[in-house]
């Protein structure tokens, strides 16, 4: 009987890709993925905030409960950075980030007492679940920005980019397997650069040539990496989604400097205006941290006013969470939890208003949605602007490949 495994994934899209890649390697080594009752339970952890670390501990408990006889493996950013601080009494194996093939061999040899299998195959098996319509592909890892609040550079290390040929081959295989939207993800994907000097825009130009690929989306990009070439590429090619996620983090220059962010408000808004001048209806989403050390009420108001000025289509708001291993944790004037949560709630209300305004502006526009669910006469999916859409089948204008999960259809209202 095959040994069974389950992977629990926390955190970003890069973690999601890492879990998928590890799952593929385990399946190639003749292990079987299950929902519970696994012989090996793997927690792919996150350490972006203290809350994320707490979720990691709860996930260990959940994994043990669902898989009482399983060997427990903790991997990812939490175990990479806090390996000496973690209580390992509940864990059979600690692993950091990367080196998935070595991890599989360790699982087979040390935990399952099996002979390591040959893992040379590069084939991506068609593991298409009914609730999965988009494929996340990691093009880059690592970060050297060292924002004062961020633990990720310590966890992920220096910038590392995959070869363009490896990326293109993987996308061709998943498109052949049925995926129509591919999401490019990385820790600092805007600094993608292959050994042959291909940059992100050059890579996109090659990706959009792939037959049957419906569209490609960037998961996140720093404002300093949004080049003229990239903007023009989005403008002229409808295979690239009309959506950019550009982290802001603060709308106050003093706080941006304390965060060690590589721009100020003037640069940020200038770049946004350049983008919107060429692509007026583009969706721009962002991340914002509130309650950073030394953030006064006036500084917070600056952030609120700046966000309204920019007019983002969606906000992801995070109360500041100090990592003791980052410079921000040592700054004076740390805010209390109640104040941080209060500011987060106030900013989220602004975010809801901006989201409604932008979403309302799309109601009369034709949209391309990737189908995620079909129920009787209704279709749910994600449009090119990164908004969930619920529509009646009578609103379909075009469905070249049929109305199935994972297919792209054109709708109008």
Image: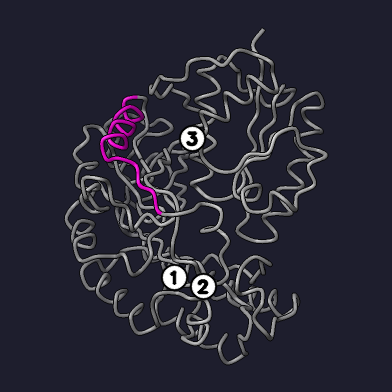
Residues shaded magenta = 159-176
Q: Which residue is mark 3?
A: 132
Q: For numbered disc 3, what is the local secondary structure?
A: loop
The disc label shown at residue 357, or none: 1
Q: Residue at x 38, y 65 (%)?
A: 222
Q: Main secondary structure of the magenta part?
A: helix
Distance CA(mark 1)–CA(mark 2):
6 Å
Are circles 1 and 2 on residues that touch, CB within 8 Å?
A: yes
Is 31 situated above or below 50? above
Distance CA(mark 1)–CA(mark 3):
29 Å
Q: Residues within 10 Å of mark 2 (few under 14, many from 20)?
A: some
Q: Nearer the viewer, mark 1 or mark 3?
A: 3
Q: For numbered disc 2, what is the local secondary structure?
A: helix
The disc label shown at residue 353, or none: 2
Image quarter for residue 191? bottom left
Distance CA(mark 2)–CA(mark 3):
29 Å
**Horizontal and vertical percent position of residue 190:** 34, 58
């Amino acid at each position: 009987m095959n040994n069974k495994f389950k992977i629990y994934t926390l955190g970003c899209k890069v973690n999601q890709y890492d879990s998928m890649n590890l799952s593929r390697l385990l399946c190639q080594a003749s292990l079987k993925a299950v929902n519970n009752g696994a012989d090996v339970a793997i927690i792919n952890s996150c350490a972006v905030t203290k809350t994320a670390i707490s979720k990691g501990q709860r996930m260990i408990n959940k994994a043990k409960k669902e898989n009482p006889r399983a060997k427990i493996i903790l991997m990812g950013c939490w175990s990479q950075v806090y390996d000496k601080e973690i209580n390992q009494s509940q864990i059979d194996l600690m692993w950091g980030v990367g080196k998935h093939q070595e991890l599989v061999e360790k699982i087979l040899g040390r935990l399952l007492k099996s002979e390591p299998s040959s893992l040379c195959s590069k084939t991506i098996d068609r593991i298409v679940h009914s609730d999965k319509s988009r494929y996340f592909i990691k093009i880059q890892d690592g970060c050297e920005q060292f924002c004062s609040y961020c633990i990720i550079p310590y966890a992920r290390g220096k910038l590392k980019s995959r070869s363009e040929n490896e990326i293109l081959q993987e996308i061709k295989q998943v498109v052949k397997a049925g995926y129509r939207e591919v999401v490019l993800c990385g820790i600092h994907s805007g600094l993608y650069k292959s050994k042959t000097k291909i940059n992100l825009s050059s890579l996109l130009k090659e990706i959009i040539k792939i037959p049957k690929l419906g569209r490609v989306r960037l998961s996140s990009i720093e404002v300093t990496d949004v080049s003229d070439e990239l903007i023009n590429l989005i403008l002229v090619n409808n295979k690239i989604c009309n959506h950019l996620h550009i982290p802001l983090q603060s709308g106050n220059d003093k706080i941006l400097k304390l965060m060690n962010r590589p721009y100020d408000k003037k640069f940020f808004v200038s770049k946004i205006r350049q983008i919107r001048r060429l692509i007026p209806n583009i969706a721009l989403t962002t991340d914002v941290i509130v309650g950073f050390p030394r953030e006064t009420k006036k500084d917070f108001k600056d952030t609120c006013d700046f966000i309204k000025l920019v007019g983002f289509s969606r906000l992801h708001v995070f109360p500041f969470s100090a990592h003791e291993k980052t410079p921000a944790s040592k700054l004076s004037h740390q805010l209390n939890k109640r104040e941080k949560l209060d500011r987060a709630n106030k900013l989220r209300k602004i975010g809801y208003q901006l989201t409604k305004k932008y979403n309302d502006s799309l109601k009369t526009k034709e949209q391309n949605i990737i189908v995620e669910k079909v129920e009787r006469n209704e279709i749910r999916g994600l449009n090119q602007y990164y908004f969930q859409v619920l529509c009646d089948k009578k609103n379909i204008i075009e469905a070249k490949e049929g109305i199935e999960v994972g297919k792209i259809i054109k709708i109008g209202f």
